[in-house]
Amino acid sequence: MDSRLSSFLQRAEAVLVRLEPYLPAQRAAIDWQQSLAARWHREGRGGYLQPLQISLDLDLGDLIGVDTQREQLARNTRQFVQGLPANHALLWGARGTGKSSLVRALLAEHAAVGLRLIEIERDHLADLPRVVEQLVKLPQRFVLFCDDLSFEAGEGDYRVLKSVLDGSLERAPENVLLYATSNRRHLVPEKHSDNAASQMVDGELHPSEAIEDKIALSDRFGLWLSFYPFTQEHYLAVVRHWIEAQATPLALDWQWSEDLEKAAIRWALGRGNRNGRCAYQFARHWVGLKLLEVRG
């Protein structure tokens, strides 16, 4: 009997050795006192939160020319961290205009009072219930952040996501909020043909079912904030801000000039973009170039 048991245990151990590489790794619980942000990773039928090392060097004052959007989202976030009612938010509009930066700046603003950020990809939003259940009884306040939430024509995923968001957001605990960014207001491409079935009844416009279906997804967010393409004046103001922010710590003596302004404009024209990201990249290029000249 002992020999049979020993033989069985040996075979079982051999099987476990072969299976071990395919088993999910043991994940340590996140210490939210130390970790300010995490990213959701899908693994098999479940997933886990991976702590992120992030810097808090982005300030709300670094976001130039989006004062209204900044104040509205900052106010909503202050309500949230103070335990007051607050809305899920959709930040939509032109790329590179500060949508994602605003969310990260708010983390820097409120991290000391318990705000935490969890990044979740669009394709993983169906895991929202699993993510939320890990956060329910924690004392911190969590913003679930989905960057670039949008769908292409023909994708049916948005209907599934609509029901997931509806259920997850309706039952979300008081310490969880969802912020998402998108290039589209309604997250889904809108076609002229969608309006073909719209009707006018007693002088009142009734949108078609196609329009209603697409709008219903963005309706899950109580706060909509619009970000528009930069004017040239706005772009140059952001360039000046970032040059100042990067030149001062490095003791670079500089002055705004017509040549510098023209260089910034040429940089934007060469990339076909005139936005905050482009302004930041030009500032880094110009400051680095000038420091290289100074140092020989």
Image (cartoon, rainbow, N blue to C red):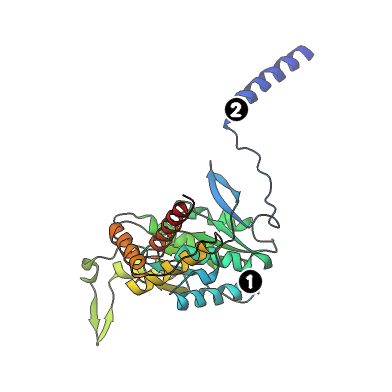
User: Is 124 situated above or below 205?
Assistant: above
Q: Position of residue 242 (x, y in %)?
A: 47, 65
Q: Residue at x 42, y 54 (%)?
A: 289
Image side of residue 230 versus residue 60, left or right: left
Name which residue type carries label 2. Leu
Mark positioned earlier in the residue sequence (2 or 1): 2
Image side of residue 290 versus residue 191, left or right: right
Q: Position of residue 191 (x, y in %)?
A: 24, 65
Q: Position of residue 266 (x, y in %)?
A: 30, 61
Residue designated by label 2: 19
Residue 81: numbered disc: 1
Towards the viewer: 108 or 269: 269
Q: Specify whether residue 258 is in view.
A: yes
Image side of residue 93 versus residue 45, left or right: left
Q: Residue at x 46, y 64 (%)?
A: 243
Q: CA distance from mark 2 to mark 1?
A: 45 Å
Q: Residue at x 79, y 14 (%)?
A: 2
Name which residue type carries label 1. Val
Most extreme residue toward the top is 3
Secondary structure found at label 1? helix
Q: Position of residue 182 (x, y in %)?
A: 40, 63
Q: Would you identify the image quadrant in which residue 139 lies?
A: bottom right
Q: From the viewer's perspective, is the residue at label 2 or at label 1 nearer?
A: 1
Q: How busy is the neighbourhood of tag 1: few (under 14 within 10 Å), some, or many (20 plus)?
A: many
User: Is 235 situated above or below 32?
Assistant: below
The N terminus, quarter of image: top right
Q: Specify whether residue 172 is in view.
A: no
